[in-house]
Amino acid sequence: MKTVIISNRLPVKIIEENDEYTFIPSEGGLATGLGDVYKSGNSVWIGWPGIEVPEERQEEVKQKLAELNLYPVFLTQNEINLYYEGFSNEVLWPVFHYVVTYAHYEQNYWDCYKSVNEKFAKSAIEILNKRDKIWIQDYQLLLLPGILREKLPASTIGFFQHIPFPSYEIFRLIPWREELLNGIMGADLVGFHTYDDVRHFISTVTRLLPVNSSSNILNSNERQIVVEAFPMGIDFKKFSGLTSTDEVKKEISYFKSGKEDIKIIISIDRLDYSKGILERLKALELLLQLHPEYIGKIELFMIVVPSRDTVQQYSDLRDQIDQFVGNLNARYRSMDWIPVNYFYRSFPIEVLSALYSSADICLVTPMRDGMNLVSKEYVASRNNNDGVLILSEMAGASKELTDALIVNPNNLGDIMEAIVLALKMPLAEQQHRMKAMRAIVEKFNVKHWVNNFILRLNEVKDSQKSLQTK
Ligand code: G6P
């Protein structure tokens, strides 16, 4: 009996250079969070390898991935355009992050979303055994639980959504809202990062479908679906341990040399309008305007990892960031100091670890975020218990990391004041807060998250079976 994880993206993606395929780790919370865990258990993972692979090379890719227990679902360029960029990232992503004006409700996006979810079901059925557990991940596959339930009525299906679930008033805007909910309802257990997401989901389902709820249990067509919060964690030991490796130590000394008197602030995100990157820069600008005493004394290291840049809103955002950073640096820099060190690329984990260990402040201010694992990675890397985390109240992580300086990301003055507070915070207070947060991140790590979800899935299935035999 194995666990079959299904997500849009595999934890590795293909990069093509001179006709050569290389496999590198994928970006984003889902891949980085679950990536290591699946290797250690009896699991296989089904998903898209990140580019269009021509038919004649599909067998080669399949074989390479099979060595890693990964099974590819190949998407054509048209499917990438309509299902991935279109419905997933121009309808569901903006609506679920409350940016409803960015949504394009195109019928052909929807048609393709349906057919690609069917395609994933077909791939899954090829490798599924009767007693396997199926664990479907995220918003790109909302219809998959329903499709698999129809084809394999007795199967055990868990569904976890890594992004927020919006309130009913927002979700109801989607033209295909009932179909989407019916899809999710194919699962036995539905998980979200926070209790608020659970609440929104239950309220939406009971208003839009003929479904009753009793507490967190939904009753539909003689089936019971359990909805619960499972806040995702990270591999605490990995991040905590990395900081003492030779490679990371070398990066740290390289990075810190000449910056002994500078307070370092870091910001690490995928390129995304939900991350509040521009607002964060504006808050820094405000700080330099209102507190000129910090000019020459602080530096922001801002990493933006390229993502979805074939979607218009993402490439527009990239241009806006380029412009803003250029403008800010040009106005404030001196011959030997620059306020924003901006990188538009991904970095190996050793460099990220060096940044986490060197930073006096970590600025995480998304406008809305399912969880946000960067905030947890920073905390896990602070083995000396110092450093200050500034965290948006709109990130799922703010429900757990209550010892961060919590800010409203729309309030630039609030962010600016939090930075000033962090810069002035006595070491004892930093340590008090950091210790409390580290205890949480260490205990509720990613293994705990996986085990907890799978355990609940088994319990839910067992209680369903005993209901049916009564
Ligand atoms: C978020 C989503 C994931 C997604 C990741 C990267 O973390 O929850 O489902 O994989 O972003 O985005 P991408 O579009 O590159 O897969």
Image: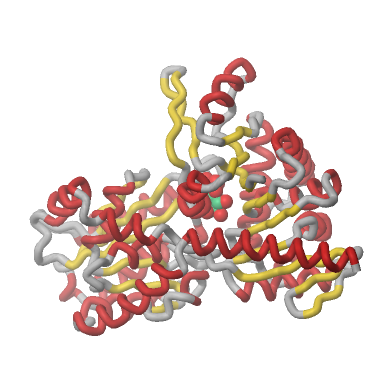
Q: Can residue 373 be seen in this view?
A: yes
In-front residue for pair 302/105: 302
Residue 389's place in the image compared with 271, above or below, is below
Frontmost residue, 243 versus 8: 243
Does residue 88 appear to the left or right of 277 in the view shown?
Answer: right
Q: Residue at x 35, y 59 (%)?
A: 237
Quarter holding the N terminus? top right
Q: Which residue is drawn at 58% across and 26% down?
A: 62
Left or right? Give the position of 208 relative to 166. Answer: right
Work out whether 380 lies above or below 401: above
In the drawing, does residue 169 fall left or right of residue 182?
left
Q: Where is residue 129 in the image (x, y as percent from the top left)?
A: 73, 40
> Which residue is at the front of the view, 119 or 449?
449
Question: Where residue 218 sits in the image (x, y, percent)?
Answer: 80, 71
Q: Which of 79 and 329 is in front in this view?
A: 79
Query: For residue 267, what is the image quadrant?
Result: bottom left
Marker count (numbered): 0
Q: Residue at x 76, y 63 (%)?
A: 462
Q: Position of residue 339 (x, y in %)?
A: 22, 60
Residue 173, position as x, y percentages in the image: 75, 63
